Amino acid sequence: MEETTSNFIHDFIDEDLAAGVYDRVQTRFPPEPNGYLHIGHAKAIQINFTTAKKYGGVCNLRLDDTNPSKEDMEYVDAIKEDIRWLGFQWNDVYYASGYFDFIHQCAIRLIELGKAYVDDSTADEIRESRGTLTEPGKESPYRGRSVEENLDLFCRMTAGEFPDGARVLRAKIDMQSPNMNMRDPVIYRIAHIAHHQTGDKWCVYPLYDFAHPLSDYKEGVTHSLCSLEFENHRPLYDWFLRALDLPQPPRQIEFARLNLNYCLTSKRKCLQLVNEGIVDGWNDPRMATICGMRRRGYPAEAIRDFIGRVGVSKAYSVVDFGLLEACVRDNLNKNAPRCMAVLRPLRVVIDNYPDGKTEEIELPVNQDKPEMGTRKTTFSKELFVEREDFMKEPPKKYFRLFPGNEVRLRGAYFVKCVGFDEDEDGVVTCVHCTYDPASRGGNSPDGRKVKGTLHWVSADDSLPFTAKLYDRLFNAENPSDESKGSFKDNLNPDSLIVLEGCRLEGGLSGLKPGDTFQFMRQGYFCVDTTSTPEKTVFNRTVQLNSSWK
């Protein structure tokens, strides 16, 4: 999504600027550091950063760290890394915990205004008293406490006098409201937990709905852009700002979140996948996390392109994963260098090729980009081809190797199959061919045609590697649909196939994690983060053609 692209969010901002409500634009991306970012966060990141850029404003990163029991600096560091990798840079980094003093003062001010009270009810009692969507709530027996008593109790809560869960501070709004969020929400709770930023300074912590608008205000945010599930929270967001009589409050605007089929983004369920060893950590290439997509080889530019194609709207929709793959495929097709790799090797011996002879074959790095130059690979008497490229008794319209048939070895020579060796179980172990020396470059001087072109690597000058073939993690379009059982019941048993003993053309030395190639006829692959000089590992990023139906 280019910063010049307009949408309904920009229309609202244009109206605010024209009316003089604000004379600048400031946004923020405010994740909670309790997990890793996923593809849905990428949309929020792109909307916030590009909106600020369009209007010459700033976008800050704010970690909404109001729940220390679930948060960790590991997640803070990962969030920063993901945003940078996507291609965005914040103006400043803030923490909601940095505003705890201000937020605490706001809570005291609400008590002084008679708009907040300390409630001794248990969590279950508060939950039961809130009513339902069709029935109003019931007022707490502690709702009528005096300002003085509430101030005293909240001060004692803050001093650590009471245990966890003994009391909470609630906003005094309207227990009859049709909006459940307005029925005297809890705004502070007791939690004797050390915080990763503030240490043991606090034993009371604000709830997200209270801290969020106050953090936005304190930070100078003009437009608080968030996903659609917070639309019902906007009246509460606005109520806090009005009740405290804060000048020039920020405006909350909601957009539809990114829902991608065959994906799971629930942090709780993703954590379960990680903890139970179903996936190889948060950055498993099958996960919908940004770090997982990065490890799989998805270019950041392709993800930005995908989000731009999805667009910004207020309508709920589910996007086909195939669109994301198409964006990745389009990007890699333009930019990835080509090479030859054999995933399931079958030895080929060219009987009439001179023993000990080798020659260099020159091939384009990317035939669609001549400016990328050429590469050289070694041709020799013994080669490897794909096992599926030979059949003893082929069906009709099989144009690859079989006894008596001639094929082209890409960029090299015409070869004809003259026989094969097999073991006692009938498994072919070697194919014997002859070559036409006059066909170097893949063309015959007498003009004869062959219908099959195979990729190959030299047996002596090729790099062994492990290939990890990734597919979608779930078989169900909506793996979270519990009407069809647990999300784990929808796992795809073939989401990862590991192939050992693969071979990569020689000359590709110095490979490092993240290096991406198009393996001819195979797909796009990148070097995995676990790869070492002793053992090279490639992940399949995406197939050459869509496998999504």
Image: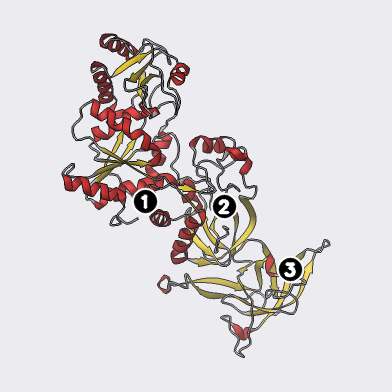
How far apart are labels 1 and 3 at the CA level?
Answer: 56 Å
Q: Nearer the viewer, residue 222 or 190?
A: 222
Q: Earlier in the sequence, mark 1 or mark 3?
A: 1
The residue to which callout 2 is attached is: 534
> Residue placed at 29% from the left, 25% from the top?
100
Query: CA separation, marks 1 and 2?
Result: 46 Å
The disc label shown at residue 430, or none: 3
Q: Is residue 287 left or right of residue 149?
A: right
Please give the name of the residue rendered at 79% of the width and 66% of the height, measured from the top-left corner: 422
Q: Quadrant of residue 520?
A: bottom right
Q: Quadrant of residue 348?
A: bottom right
In the rendered image, the quadrant that contains the N terminus is bottom left
Q: Nearer the viewer, mark 1 or mark 3?
A: 1
> In the rendered image, which quarter is residue 32 located in?
top left
Would you name the residue on which mark 1 appears? 312
Q: Position of residue 473 (x, y in %)?
A: 58, 47
